[in-house]
Amino acid sequence: MSVSNTLIVRGQQMGPDHLIPLDVTGEADIQAQVDQVRAALADEGALDGGVQWAHDRKVLLVRLVGPLDGSSPAVEHAKAIALSVEQGLAVEFQSVRYSRVELEALSERLLPTQAEWAPGGIPRASGGCDLAQNRVVLLVPNDAGDTAAWAECVEAMQDDRVLLLFSTPDPRGDWIDQGPPHQP
């Protein structure tokens, strides 16, 4: 007697060599839709402020550069593109000042070149593009006594796209946030 195992996933028969993707969060379908919206907005680079799934609110956040009041045909076009791709998700549009592409480029320029502009030429900042804050975040440990020098360096950039945060190293290896961000 021969035994044959048949696996059926979402109404489709799967062979023995078929891999089933692991969905740890239970939101793989939602993430696929988020990725589709993100891809659809890729051609709208100057308007795309980033796309993010707000798990706690079950809302797709679509950030666009420009007014959301209907006065910008380009923004309205980008909104229509996002809405044409999503499949039943609740969508919230947010107006932001800077595009995702612009912030990513700034982050990619600042972080690797810290030896040229950081206090004493010592690269200590981590961070990157933070779409929720619509800024490039520089996270600097405040354990070396150089917080004022870092603040001066960031202020000298005269770039409000850069947000400086200080953190205190915890002996357990974690970081403790130390108050409000420093912004020029």
Image (cartoon, grey):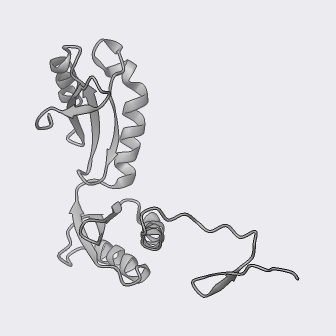
Specify the quadrant that holds the N terminus.
bottom right
Q: Which quadrant of the view contains residue 169?
A: top left
Q: Position of residue 178 (x, y in %)?
A: 14, 32
Q: Is residue 144 left or right of residue 78?
A: left
Residue 4 placement (x, y as % from top left):
79, 80
Residue 115 visible in image: yes
Residue 21 vs 178, above or below: the answer is: below
Q: Residue at x 41, y 83 (%)?
A: 87
Q: Of all residues shown, which one is farthest toward the top?
A: 120
Q: Nearer the viewer, residue 24 or 119?
A: 24
Figure check: 111 above or below 15: above
- Residue 40 shown left or right of residue 49 in the figure: right
- State the image coordinates of residue 89 (x, y, percent, origin top left): 34, 79
Name the quadrant containing residue 146. Answer: top left
Q: Residue 10: image x %, image y %? A: 57, 84
Q: Quadrant location of residue 125?
A: top left
